[in-house]
Image (cartoon, rainbow, N blue to C red):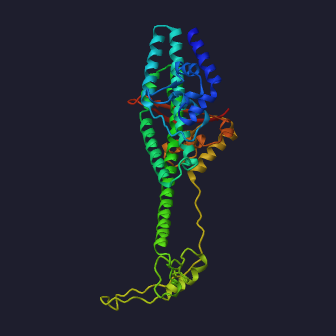
Amino acid sequence: MNINLNKSGVSLLNALSNHSELIMQAYFSGSVNEAEYSPNIIQSLIDLKVLWRPESDVQLRLRPSLRTLLEESLQDESNRQIDANIGNLLATLTTQAEHYKEALAHQKYHESQAHLSDLTEHVYTLTETLSTNVRLLWSRISNEFGYVSSVDAKIRENELAQTQVTDMLNQLSMFHFDALSQLAGSHRELRHLLVITLQSAFATSTQELSLVQSKLLELLGRFREFKGRTRLLKGFMLHMEQKPDFTPVNYSTLSQVPSLFNRADGIIKVAAPDIHNVEHEFELTSLVNSLRTVNRLWQGKLNREVANPLILEQETSVSLEEDLLKNAVENYFCEVIDSGQNTRALDYYNNHNLTFDQEVWIYQVLGAFQGLPDSERQYFDIDLEGVPHQVFDGNFIIQDIELGLR
């Protein structure tokens, strides 16, 4: 542990604790009123990189890194900054992984642990950045951009959020997990960090961003609807200011009602038969039978076809024949159980003079065994007899099956 860094960190945290009111004032107001504090305090905070002056004629402000820390800790809804710089983080991960693998190759275990610690910190920083960006977008959507008042400002904020979502999706497209998997190789720690952890964060962020994008489009349509109604109301108010004696016409007394006000539905709906209603089946059948035959001028009297009347008959049940092959396989299993001896499938096939194809018979026996529940399959033993394929390695040709009880 570096003693100087430890002392510097303790001094920084003590300064943040002792001057918390000054820091929060600078956070909310944007600058520090130097007249309210002693020059020593101001100078000490400048030396600790807490405050800074962008230009000589500008008041002191909080450092951007400290402001980001406060925005994240306080979950400030006014924070509209999205960190989409994922490309640099990915490049840093690749470099740290190469350092770790090189240190292991040279058996520098202490140095490799240091690189692994840095790599772990960068991975978790990247995943936290993704989750923070999504959380910021959802927080802005939840209150419908309540930190701005006008509808036009809400539309602009919505368009900005959509641009940020697009940028984040473009940044997420830089993840190439096949390359990361190849980089990790057989190292368990690297695979856990570069593949499992990053892939989980990638899947969650991608799914959340798709939902955010659809919600933003829905909100944009609602804001534009509000804007249109507001414009219509303002136009009516301007019209009333210019013509204060205006009175609406009694449209109910007009013979030609404008389409804007004629919004009532028809009293009598259009008649249409419901062919899916079973209760109307007999009426529809009688109507079809009573239809007159349409005569064509070019048809002769002798060649004219006579339409047969439709007759509604009682539905007949269809009986399916039992599958003979399935029954034969079941009888084969029953014979093995009754005899308690191992029986070959082809021996049973020849002894009972079955007429099925032998290959189909063997395939059906194997399929029946595989289809048994685990509680029943454990009572049987099966032995596959065959030969390897002469040309294609790894292929086994089954010639017969021997089934028995355990």
In the orientation shown, which residue stands out farthest toward the left?
Answer: 298
Number of marks in picture: 0
Left/right of residue 253 with respect to residue 393 in the rendered view:
right
Q: Which of 268 and 74 is in front in this view?
A: 74
Residue 321 sits in quarter: bottom right
Q: Which quadrant: the N terminus? A: top right
Left/right of residue 151 with respect to residue 334 in the rendered view:
left
Relative to 280, is 170 above or below?
above
The x and y percentages for residue 310 are: 51, 82
Image point (58%, 82%), residue name: 282
The x and y percentages for residue 303 are: 34, 87
The x and y percentages for residue 230 are: 50, 62
Q: Nearer the viewer, residue 207 or 365?
A: 207
Relative to 154, is 207 above or below?
above
Q: Nearer the viewer, residue 272 or 235?
A: 235
For the question of whether residue 132 can be seen, the reply is yes
Relative to 293, is 210 above or below?
above
